[in-house]
Image: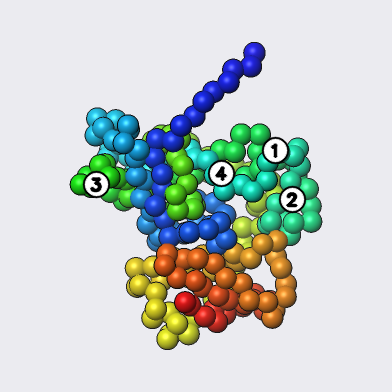
Amino acid sequence: MTTDLTLRPIAHIRSVFPSKFGIPRQSGLTETLRSEIVFEEAFRSPQALRGLSDFSHLWIIWGFSENVESGWSPTVRPPRLGGNQRMGVFATRSPFRPNPLGLSSVKIEAIRTDPRSGTVISVWGADLMDGTPIYDIKPYIPADCHPDAVCGFADHTQGHRLSVTIAPQLLARIPQTLQDGLYSILAQDPRPSYQEDPMRIYGFGFADFEVRFRVAGKDLEVVEII
């Protein structure tokens, strides 16, 4: 039986990521950066969140709203495999899916009321671009955790980390509350597909800044912050 389902956003995210490049590859990898879930006007009733403050974490169901490609493919090239090996789309977190939906687990920092935006949820560890549509949220419960889970090819790529160097005069341009988050993002190697040109300068948006860096081996150096 085929059933068509129409989804509409209940909220959008506010985050320090103005573009896709530089976003953590999954939620929870950068727990020192705060984002905000801002509800659409039709869903701002405080009653809808009654009891949520008793939970520590949330599941966010959201949309890959910035996909530049249409359609989907049965196989994709995961960046963490260098972009050279194909895997089945359902064995990956690829955004190019039959239904472009993402799933993220985040930690609740606070639930507050804003005079303009109504009830807002502040969260830690989101991997969403600023403005990403959110279609649902659900409380995270201990049964969602499986400590003995086997993670396929992801088990072999999780240890990839870079040593990050940022000159003090450059780091001083970043607000102190965001500095740990920036280090964490850079250490995870935001380059696409393990590109290995040590002379190439990469850049990505971070809050109100443009961070530019280069990588030689396992050493990343920030060369400019604008």
Give, as a three-letter code, the residue at label 3.
Arg
x and y, in percent, of residue 51 in the image: 27, 33
Which quadrant is the N terminus positioned in?
top right
As drawn, is 220 to the left or to the right of 27?
right
Which residue was labeled with disc 3?
A: 116
Q: Disc 4 on helix, strand or loop?
A: loop
x and y, in percent, of residue 202 in the image: 61, 72
For the residues marked 1 and 3, what is the alpha-carbon distance in whole angstroms? Answer: 37 Å
x and y, in percent, of residue 126 in the image: 45, 51
For the residues marked 2 and 1, what is the alpha-carbon distance in whole angstroms? Answer: 15 Å
Q: Which mark is residue 77?
A: 2
Disc on the earlier residue, 2 or 4: 4
Give, as a three-letter code, the residue at label 1.
Gly
Residue at 36%, 50% in the rendered image: 36
Q: Disc 2 on helix, strand or loop?
A: loop
Residue at 39%, 68% in the rendered image: 178
Considering depth in this image, is 225 or 105 the residue closer to the camera? 225
Mark 3 and mark 2 in contact? Answer it, CB < 8 Å.
Answer: no
Which residue was labeled with disc 4?
A: 64
Disc on the earlier residue, 1 or 4: 4
For the residues marked 1 and 4, what is the alpha-carbon distance in whole angstroms? Answer: 13 Å
Q: Nearer the viewer, mark 3 or mark 4?
A: 3
Q: Residues within 10 Å of mark 2 (few under 14, many from 20)?
A: some
Q: How is the image coloured?
A: rainbow
Give, as a three-letter code, the residue at label 2.
Arg
Q: Nearer the viewer, mark 2 or mark 4?
A: 4
Q: Is residue 112 visible?
A: no
Disc on the earlier residue, 3 or 2: 2
- Quarter of the view holding residue 94: top right
Q: Residues within 10 Å of mark 1 (few under 14, many from 20)?
A: few
